[in-house]
Image (tube, grey):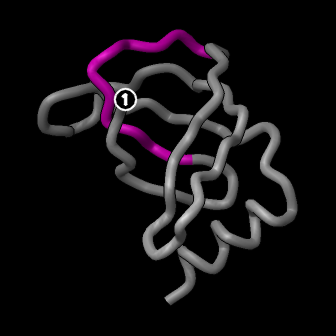
Amino acid sequence: MGTSIDLSLDGMLLRHRRVTEPRERALLRFALPGRPLELQITAGSSGSKKVALRAGNGVSIRFDTASDSQRHQLRSTSSP
């Protein structure tokens, strides 16, 4: 489990205790603020990055299988 630091239509940056290898794959499950249902999106890691985060590594994740509906939810969440 990790904590989302940054979220975009294409992926997210997570603070995570475990180091990941490039191209490591995972099924991500997460909820967006104000949304009752979880999104489930297959994603691949770009690998752990040494970034200035308290307690953990920065893990860059790229979404592989976000549907049009999921992308719409991501877009509406990140809009001002």
Residue extending farthest to the left is 54
Magenta stretch encompasses residue 21:
yes
Where are the magenta residues, as a range? 12-22
Question: In terms of image quadrants, where is residue 28?
Answer: top right
Q: Where residue 56 sits in the image (x, y, percent)?
A: 22, 27
Residue at image coords 82%, 41%: 65
- Count of numbered tags: 1
Three-letter amino acid code of the residue under disc 1 = Met
Residue at image coords 75%, 72%: 72
15 horizontally vs 54: left or right: right
Q: Where residue 42 sits in the image (x, y, percent)?
A: 72, 33
Q: Where residue 18 sits in the image (x, y, percent)?
A: 34, 14
Q: Which residue bears the numbered disc 1? A: 1
Magenta stretch encompasses residue 45:
no
Question: SS for tag 1?
Answer: loop
Q: Where residue 34 sits in the image (x, y, percent)?
A: 46, 76
Q: Out of 18 and 28, give the one closest to the viewer.
A: 28
| Figure check: 48 above or below 58 | above
8 horizontally vs 63: left or right: left
Question: In terms of image quadrants, where is residue 8?
Answer: bottom right
Residue at image coords 37%, 13%: 19
